Image: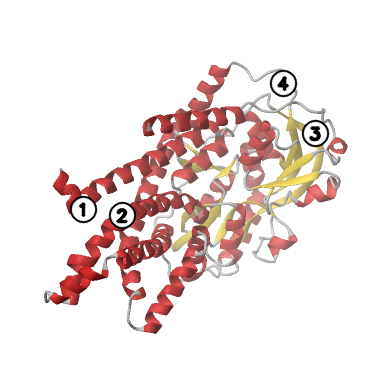
Amino acid sequence: MKKRCIAISIILLTALLLAGCSGAGKGKRLETLEDLNDPSVTIGAMTGSAQEPYIAKVFPKAEEKQFRTVNEMVIALDSGQIDAFVHSKDNILSAMKEKPGEFRLIEEPVGETPVGMAVSPHTKYPELLSQVNEFLKDMKASGELDEMYQRWMGEDVPPMPDIPEAEDPVGVLSVGTSGELVPNSFYADGELVGYDIELTKRFAYKYDYAVEFRPEGIDARISDTEFGRVDMLSGGIGETPERAEKVIFPDTPLYMQPISAVVRADRAGSGNFFENIANSLEKTLVRENRWKMILSGLAVTLELSVGAFILGCALGFVLCMLRRSRNKAVSSFTNGFVSLIDGIPALLVLLICFYVVFSKMGLKEIPVAIIAFSITFGCRVSSVLNTGLNSVDRGEIEAAEAMGLSPLQVFTKIQFPQAVNLTFGMFKTQVVTMIKNTSIVGYIAVMDLTKASDIIRARTYESFFSLVFTAVIYFLIARAALALLTMLGDRIDPRRRAKK
């Protein structure tokens, strides 16, 4: 019966996702920018992007809907959730190549914005801004900057040129980049490529830097640059007065980026269903060996899960003991800390650890993430264990004490084993919750399973297989964890051992 319910759930999920892939009705035809300036029209834009303010300026009557990525806007437009979206023309054209015949560009420009690199006001390299200014000025004067733009923003995305690396680097530049924006910064065959990446590598080679790229969302990139978490941004950043208050834009912009609007094309049908499915599967997994990104992300997810499990169990035991301390100040403080963490979403705990607690310690993202997840998990474990210890019959404890057992022996032989057996089911639930919580680690630029799925969707502009495979893998991880914990429970429970 249990297996049947699982199978039915998977079938229903698949049917729901297939329905979401079917698209929406045509609605009225949108030909001009004036057609979009209507209360019945919903226009999408990326949250915090340089293009987002143009909706209020050019389309004051339209309804605005904000998204985190270009990929989300493409999918929303394809499914009929929005009628149009506004973004950089080059990025729109790249999306249209991936889904030919699906969308139509409104030729009338919405506006334009200068696009540039950006330097942190708190970079560890004081000379970095002057070097970037000198580099861009020379590139502009020699025509190399314009040549790069024409090459990357043309009809076909070119191969990434081989750029030498500094043999004896003076330091490592931490560089924020998108990783999801064609043709500026994106993954091809598992490697970061694009206009921004080439430009940054050329700069690093000229001034003898090694480069460490951090792919993350626009809001995180700006924040990391503002507070010195990264030294600079690779490019593709629209220059706005608000952003100029947080980061430093060089004197020379990379180029002026046209801003355009895109709508759904008039299409008679969606093609052969099985051909579409096969094409989507090929794009998601086979093309550019994208399955390797899934495996790489899976390895990170397992690393986070195992690390947080081990550290969280140890922390949970310590917190539980402190909560039961006879010292009122210690127990009250620990109970307050556990209550505080229990009341905060796991995402906020992760961000606080990364941007506040460990921001100046130089810890890498994965160790910080393991610590953050273990704190959340450990607090839950402490509550579960505390509940189990409180459930042990007081009469058994008194009987053990009367037999002459020491307090440590009473705890290790009577209280703790019973508490574990009584609450092992709740403990397994918390383990599965912790594993699922690791999916938020992409917010601090760690490429786990979910982040790898996001990057693939950003290239293919299709959600079905990337989301389904990710969901299935998390399901299998959770089932495997439950199976292993159940085996462990059978070994530590004397009654189950006796039955076997």
Q: At 83% across and 38% down in the image, what residue appears?
A: 40
**Cβ–Cβ under 8 Å for marks 1 and 3:** no
Q: For marks 2 and 4, give the one nearer the viewer.
A: 2
Q: For marks 2 and 3, give the one nearer the viewer.
A: 2
Q: Nearer the viewer, residue 476 or 419?
A: 419
* Label 3 SS: strand
Mark 2 is on which residue type? Answer: Phe
The CA distance from mark 3 to mark 4 is 19 Å
- The answer to whether residue 173 is above or below residue 69 is below
List the single residue furthest toward the right.
34
Q: Which mark is residue 424?
A: 2
Residue under numbered circle 3:
107
- Is residue 396 visible in the rendered image? The answer is yes
Residue under numbered circle 4:
267
x then y, percent, for residue 174: 49, 59
- Is residue 98 visible in the rendered image? The answer is no
Q: Nearer the viewer, residue 174 or 263?
A: 263
The CA distance from mark 1 to mark 4 is 63 Å
Mark 1 is on which residue type? Answer: Asp
Q: Is residue 473 left or right of residue 178?
A: left
* Label 4 SS: loop
Within-10-Å neighbours for mark 2: few <14, some 14–19, many 20+: many
**Cβ–Cβ under 8 Å for marks 1 and 2:** yes
Classify residue 37 by image quadrant: top right
x then y, percent, for residue 17: 56, 31
Point out the tag, 3 or 4, that comes first from the N-terminus: 3
List the single residue furthest toward the top.
272
Within-10-Å neighbours for mark 4: few <14, some 14–19, many 20+: few
Mark 4 is on which residue type? Answer: Arg
Q: At 70% across and 28% down in the image, what residue appears?
A: 24
Within-10-Å neighbours for mark 1: few <14, some 14–19, many 20+: some
